[in-house]
Image (spheres, helix red, strand yellow):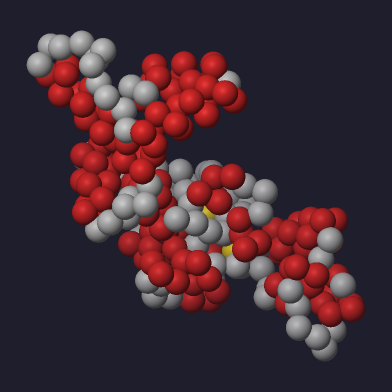
């Protein structure tokens, strides 16, 4: 299923699936000690969290496919019986919980920090995507619907820079300066040997080289570092 509303839903939710009952209700069934008490994931140990996550997934109705910017039934078989949609996905189109989720307003960027922490557990990429600026760029990179996405990414990046999103990211700014200088040198048919690095970016490269010379070489080969 694809639509403008679904696209907005995917952009604002860190979840990978949906449609299960409220997490509090499931937790009380799995762990009776929470009956009549307030529930918090912080009160669960590792094994209990795994059990809860598995139950949530088992009860889920739909999955979020970020690579295709779509929502599909968890039991989708990929075979379309009705036009370009399978029976399973056709059924969830009228699911009340899905309809409620996709019609919710997109929260303002400053409220992203209030997203429940359990969405970010054990996933390094999701941890980075808590930053709304990075998430916007990530969504652009994974949106195949527009052939002009290549230019959109740079326009979005420049716009966020003008908004001050990178004011306190000196290493990233230093990297952008290096890549820009390298591009200018290439246009002028000059070598890259005289490119100057900022102090913050130089320190980053020194630290990176301390961890792994291979990582440093790979970084230099691909990002002009």
Q: Nearer the viewer, residue 52 or 203?
A: 203
**Location of residue 130 in the rendering, given as x and y in whole percent from the top left corner:** 49, 56
Answer with the quarter of the image where residue 111 lies: bottom left
**Location of residue 139 in the rendering, given as x and y in whole percent from the top left corner:** 39, 49
79 vs 60: above or below: above
Residue sitting at 68 percent across and 75 percent down?
A: 22
Residue 84 in the figure: left or right of residue 23? left
Q: Is residue 37 visible?
A: yes
Residue sitting at 53 percent across and 76 percent down?
A: 96
Answer with the quarter of the image where residue 192 lies: top left
Q: Is residue 146 visible?
A: no
Q: Nearer the viewer, residue 6 or 206?
A: 206
Q: Nearer the viewer, residue 136 or 217?
A: 217
Answer with the quarter of the image where residue 142 lies: top left
Pick the quarter of the image with the N terminus: bottom left
- Total number of numbered labels? 0
Pick the quarter of the image with the C terminus: top left
82 vs 191: above or below: below
Q: In the orientation shown, which residue stands out farthest toward the right?
A: 33
Residue 67 in the figure: left or right of residue 118? left
**Location of residue 181 in the rendering, given as x and y in whole percent from the top left corner:** 21, 26
Q: Nearer the viewer, residue 221 or 91?
A: 221
Residue sitting at 25 percent across and 58 percent down?
A: 163
């Amino acid at each position: 299923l694809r639509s403008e509303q679904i696209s907005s839903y995917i952009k604002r939710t860190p979840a990978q699936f949906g449609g299960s009952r409220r997490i509090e209700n499931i937790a009380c069934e799995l762990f009776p000690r929470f009956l009549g008490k307030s529930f918090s994931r912080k009160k669960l140990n590792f094994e209990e969290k795994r059990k809860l996550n598995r139950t949530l997934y088992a009860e889920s109705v739909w999955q979020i496919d970020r690579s295709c910017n779509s929502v599909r039934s968890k039991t989708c078989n990929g075979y379309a019986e009705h036009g370009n949609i399978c029976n399973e996905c056709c059924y969830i189109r009228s699911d009340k919980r899905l309809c409620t989720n996709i019609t919710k307003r997109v929260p303002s960027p400053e409220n992203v920090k209030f997203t429940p922490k359990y969405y970010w557990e054990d996933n390094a990429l999701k941890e980075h995507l808590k930053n709304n600026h990075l998430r916007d760029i990530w969504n652009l990179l994974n949106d195949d619907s527009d052939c002009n996405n290549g230019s959109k990414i740079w326009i979005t990046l420049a716009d966020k820079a003008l908004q001050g999103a990178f004011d306190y990211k000196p290493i990233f700014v230093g990297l952008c300066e290096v890549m820009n200088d390298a591009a200018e040198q290439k246009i002028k048919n000059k070598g890259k040997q005289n490119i100057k690095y900022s102090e913050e970016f130089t320190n980053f490269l020194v630290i990176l080289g301390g961890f792994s010379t291979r990582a440093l070489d790979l970084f230099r080969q691909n990002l002009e570092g």
